[in-house]
Image: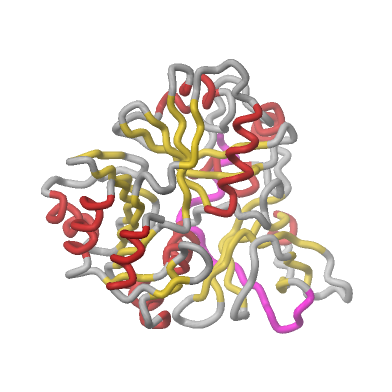
Amino acid sequence: MKPEWKAYLQNDGAEFADGDSVASFGNPERERRVTIAGNVICDLSHYGLIAAYGEDATTFLQGQFSNDVQLVDARRSQLSSYCTPKGRMLANFRMIRREDTYYLRLPQALMEPMLKRLRMYVLRSRVTLEDASASLVRMGLSGPDAASLLGDALGTAPPREIDETLTHDGITVVRIMGHHPRYEIYGLLEPLHLLWNRLNVHSAPVGAACWGLLNILAGVPVIQPGTSEAFVPQMANMELIDGVSFHKGCYPGQEIVARMQYLGNLKRRMYRVHIDAESAEPGMDIVDADTPDGNPAGRLVEAFRHPDGGLEGLAVLQISSVDNRTKLRLGQGKRAHVTLRELPYSLEVAATG
């Protein structure tokens, strides 16, 4: 994070947790409440940026990721993932393009291992990969009035469709999934500072966990170190949110991912859950509550506190456990009951895909 941007946020009341992650702006409970119902802005510095550019950048990235990189341009971004040869996601991310540079937005904790692994395969390709986290400021906007507020602040209408991208006066805006209109915004320091101040008039600044809660409500998984290499993309519903292409060429794990899609042998799927707990870490086990030793039923993707109490999360569960209405709990705790919630999209799409 640029020191100047951090100073701007601190002047607005930001309190920082580890590294560059904003814990809150002084009132976490109020921030959670307004996140669900109102208009909020959020610093996204807890996400890093990998830049990829050069004559062979498109070809190189196309051979690495689960989605069709050739579709990413000034008007369209996409979700995608980077898999092992066994088809397990090392990371998932959003990809945008500004001029001749691709940017991958992913958690800061996965930046170093992702860069290291990608660089192993550059070989003679004419592509440069670098940590660009300090190059562009990142912020998010969500709320029932987000579209009009952003349009007034930018002086032009923001994107309307999910994954649609617009760059105006050096500011890149991406429409993303959300229970209210929601946007990711990228730009240089001064333009983003001015935009933050304009939006701050009618939007409440909130901490990083609130943005995580919005991801949960939207059914969008974020792979963290605790879940890296845990899931094939379909287990985390990536193909249901346009994060996988089944028509592009080869990439690491492509055979496994394609076989799972076309043979229909998926045994685990991601669901939205409520957990009677105050905290939980990505990768924690979810078990059968009726068995003495807690037979495994799945793993937690992420979970964040909800203003009505407990945690809202996403979890990859055995489909049979869901179909059989198995009573679930988090780890070995006796009180951390896990109950299913509705996702904002249908899981039946995969059956007809």
Give left or right: position of 49 versus 334.
left
Q: Residue at x 21, y 50 (%)?
A: 191
Q: Is residue 296 above or below residue 82?
A: below
Q: Is residue 184 magenta?
A: no
* Picture quadrant of residue 42: bottom left
Q: Residue at x 81, y 75 (%)?
A: 290
Give left or right: position of 8 versus 305.
left
Q: Quadrant of the N terminus?
A: bottom left
Q: Is residue 347 magenta?
A: yes
Give left or right: position of 290 versus 201.
right
Q: Position of residue 71 (x, y in %)?
A: 41, 27
Does residue 78 appear in the picture of this structure?
no
Front residue (pair 11, 71): 11
Front residue (pair 95, 36): 95
Give left or right: position of 206 versus 303.
left
The colour scheme used to paint the residues is: secondary structure
Residue with the most extreme front position? 3
Residue with the most extreme right position? 292
Q: Residue at x 20, y 56 (%)?
A: 195
* Picture quadrant of residue 167: top left
Numbered range of the magenta stretch: 332-353
Does residue 22 appear in the picture of this structure?
yes
Q: Position of residue 163 (x, y in %)?
A: 36, 41
Q: How many marks?
A: 0
Q: Position of residue 58 (x, y in %)?
A: 46, 22
Q: Quadrant of the C terminus?
A: top right
Front residue (pair 1, 67): 1
Front residue (pair 2, 191): 2
Q: Position of residue 226 (x, y in %)?
A: 68, 57
Q: Residue at x 59, y 23 (%)?
A: 122
